[in-house]
Image: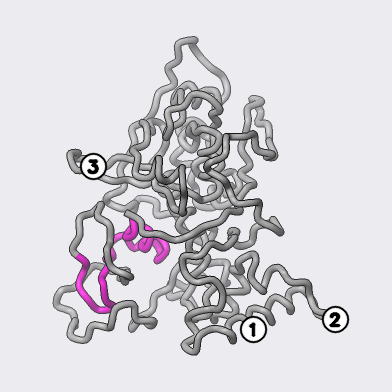
Amino acid sequence: MALTACAIVAGNKFDGYLSSTATGPPVAHAFNAVLPGPCYYFHPHPYQPDADQTSPSPPCACSSPSPYPIYPTFKDWPFPHDDLPPWWPEIPPGTFQTRSGAISGISSRVRARDESCRITGSSEEIEVPHVIPVKEATWFAQNDMSRYSYDNFSIDNSANLFVLREDMHTAYDNFRWTIAPKTPPAASEPKWYFVYLDRTEEMGSQYHNVEMRPMLGVRSEYLLAGFARAIFYLLLPFLNNCAPKWLIGTSVDSEDPAGKEVSGIVAAEVFRLPGTRGGRTSPKKDQSPKRQRTDDASEACNDSAPNGNTPSGPEPGSKRSRLLPNDDHDDPPPPYNDSAQPSKRNRAEEQDKDGEYVDTNENFGRMIGWHSWE
């Protein structure tokens, strides 16, 4: 998972590798193994054993000898058509056979296809969310993702829908978990697994690393995009530290493959975290909100450690409220409580031409923490 995440952020460099030092060889570990070290370096190119490896840097060095650009947000990221990770499995097409004959409406057909929540197996309080949410319809169209649909050319196609229990749907919308392939010890092919991305007292401890129920009919390309969307959300703390960064994409007005260097102050302003001094204080008298945010971002970086790489604020591992960049909401909703009983969410609903429910995925805020992934 770590290799897939790094490759996506670096521009789909799936032939790259991880090392424990900036110039070291690839780390030797099983594909599904937990990485035990404190940090790793991603190299966006195949390993060259004859290259100079005589001067390895100390672990977790703060600078790279050859910086490369990364995509900062999901909206900037181009989908890797015809170049998926070699380890990303395909899913056979599903069928819509039902006991009662033909069923009209895509949501009803998906319910009949899956029958129950793809994680818990529950058939009560179930909903039909999108793998790539409706909020990303622009990205969906720009990246020609309709080519993977089985039944229509919109984001509301059956290959982009699956059945979840209501609380699992809420947690998925809030980036608390994602789906990723892993190969069980006794299996020859990878399976799809529930991967929890946040600290938890209940949901993650109960379902983390649990194999998903059959995902027949859902396209693996959409699952890759859903995985990438969760990874870019977790990238926000990095974008908000005060170190300069090499970025590429429309968010920073750079389509050059080499990217461009963006100062920590500018990055913190463009990709600001709600709750930081750039996004919550009222503007000073005779000062515009934009100028206030920029001044506060500059002040936050000036308050950072002498090397300029560690911003002031909570230590790594502490929890902080975060939203996706450019989100229309002013304040995040309360933290999701996975121990509470499921309750109906106050969400906007739309009706398509068949009168079926379409999820608008408006609820983005949540509390996130950091822990090791498998």
Front residue (pair 89, 123): 123
Q: Quadrant of the C terminus?
A: bottom left
Look at discs 2 and 1 and give the one toward the viewer: 1
Instruction: Indicate left or right for 230 with 82 as reference.
Output: right
Local crowd size for mark 1, using a 10 Å CA cut-off: few (<14), some (14–19), many (≥20): some
Asked which quadrant contains residue 16, the reply is: bottom left
Residue that badge 1 annotates: 299
Whether residue 361 is situated above or below residue 264 in the rendered picture:
above
Q: Are marks 3 and 1 in contact (CB under 8 Å)?
A: no
Q: Disc 3 on helix, strand or loop?
A: loop
Residue type highlighted by circle 2? Asp
Q: Position of residue 139 (x, y in %)?
A: 55, 52
The residue most toward the right is 286
Which residues are the magenta region? 1-27
Q: Position of residue 137 (x, y in %)?
A: 58, 47
Gap between marks 2 and 1 measured at Cα: 19 Å
Q: Position of residue 115 (x, y in %)?
A: 46, 23
Residue at figure coordinates x 25%, y 79% from the top left: 23
Is residue 262 visible to us here? no
Asked which quadrant contains residue 183, the reply is: top left
Residue type highlighted by circle 3? Pro
Q: Position of residue 341 (x, y in %)?
A: 57, 35
Is residue 122 visible to us here? yes
The first of marks 3 and 1 along the sequence is 3
Local crowd size for mark 2, using a 10 Å CA cut-off: few (<14), some (14–19), many (≥20): few
Q: Disc 1 on helix, strand or loop?
A: helix
Whether residue 360 is situated above or below residue 66 in the rendered picture:
above
Residue that badge 3 annotates: 184
Residue at figure coordinates x 51%, y 39% from the top left: 168
Residue that badge 2 annotates: 286
Local crowd size for mark 3, using a 10 Å CA cut-off: few (<14), some (14–19), many (≥20): few
**Residue 347, label in figure:** none
